Image (cartoon, rainbow, N blue to C red):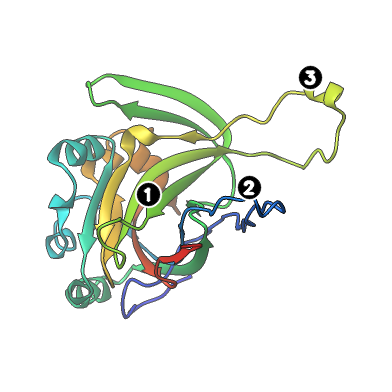
Amino acid sequence: MRGRGANQPSAAAPHSSSQLASSSPVTNNNSSTAQPSPPAYLAQIRFDVLQVRAPKGLFSESDKVWSHLDGEVIPATTATLLQRNGLRVARGKLEAWRPIKALLDAEPRIQTLRSALTMNNGLPFRLELHAEPRDQLFFLYRQDGTLGGAPFPASINVLRIEYRIPLDDANALEVEVMPELQPQRGRSRGAISPEAWLTEAPFPPARVVRELAFRIVLHQEEFVAIGPSPAAHEIPYLAGSLLLCQELDGQRYESVFFVTPRLLQPGTARGS
């Protein structure tokens, strides 16, 4: 898993999962009553992810990396809320990667993981942050300052990324990123009768934490960085701690994810 010297943040994460689907147009065989369909804008988005894992403090307690990125790309109130919940985000340009790479190369215990996945038809990209389900407590500071929490047994932590092409810029991509806790579904129950659905316990739903969502508009070769704030190490049940920090061989580690979405098929009107 150890890797050094990434040329740019264009790949990586331990696990990524998604469901791909395609839609078929509905047609009306009666030509006298058929109405033309409105234009539909289709796109293929490739998500390249680079995870950089380092000992505690490199990202959460230092501005060495963050000083090369634009942390003012989201509203100050959103940035403050995220940092209180153990998260820090910023936007980066391709030219910022060279000094960041030099800083990472100077650290002897850096580890990197890379992955890439192409999404179609606007389905969200889900980046699974660990392989094995965990029994965990999740707590959240809300915008009004209150603190809430709940247990999530046998769950997997996910970064959920939704996206769209802005109407005023067909070459850009607006991404909305948020945590998601996905309960383990276990074995598939297969086909069962309608009566059985009334008696069998349903699968618990995923918890999408939209309270911690943020939006960033990215242009060609720009990326979003998602890492820990100091609060990630102060309270172990906050989002930043659960998503981005872990204990390995008795030592605390933290990760930053550099996500670079690329528009492979620019928005083209279909049916217009």
Q: Mark 3, residues whose alpha carbon is within 10 Å: few (<14), some, or many (≥20)? A: few
**Residue 241 position in % (x across, y down):** 36, 41
Look at label 3 and name its amino acid.
Leu
Please identify the quarter of the rendering in which residue 202 is found. Answer: top right
Look at label 2 and name its amino acid.
Thr
**Is residue 129 visible to us here?**
no
Q: Name the residue under label 3.
A: 198
- Give me the residue at 78% from left, 19% from top: 198
Q: Mark 1 points at which residue?
A: 244
Mark 1 vs mark 3, CA separation in Å:
39 Å
Task: State whether residue 181 is above or below residue 146.
Answer: below
**Is residue 209 visible to us here?**
yes
Mark 1 or mark 3, whichever is nearer to me: 3
- Decide which of 158, 110 is in the foreground and name it: 158
Mark 2 vs mark 1, CA separation in Å:
55 Å
Please identify the quarter of the rendering in which residue 167 is found. Answer: bottom left
- Give me the residue at 26% from left, 56% from top: 217
229 relative to 2 in the view: left or right: left
Of pointers 1 and 3, the one earlier in the residue sequence: 3
Task: State whether residue 11 is above or below residue 33.
Answer: below
Mark 2 vs mark 3, CA separation in Å:
42 Å
Q: Mark 2 points at which residue?
A: 33
Look at label 1 and name its amino acid.
Leu
Q: Mark 1, residues whose alpha carbon is within 10 Å: few (<14), some, or many (≥20)? A: many
Q: How many labels does the image show?
A: 3
Extreme residue in the front direction: 32
**Residue 215 position in % (x across, y down):** 28, 47
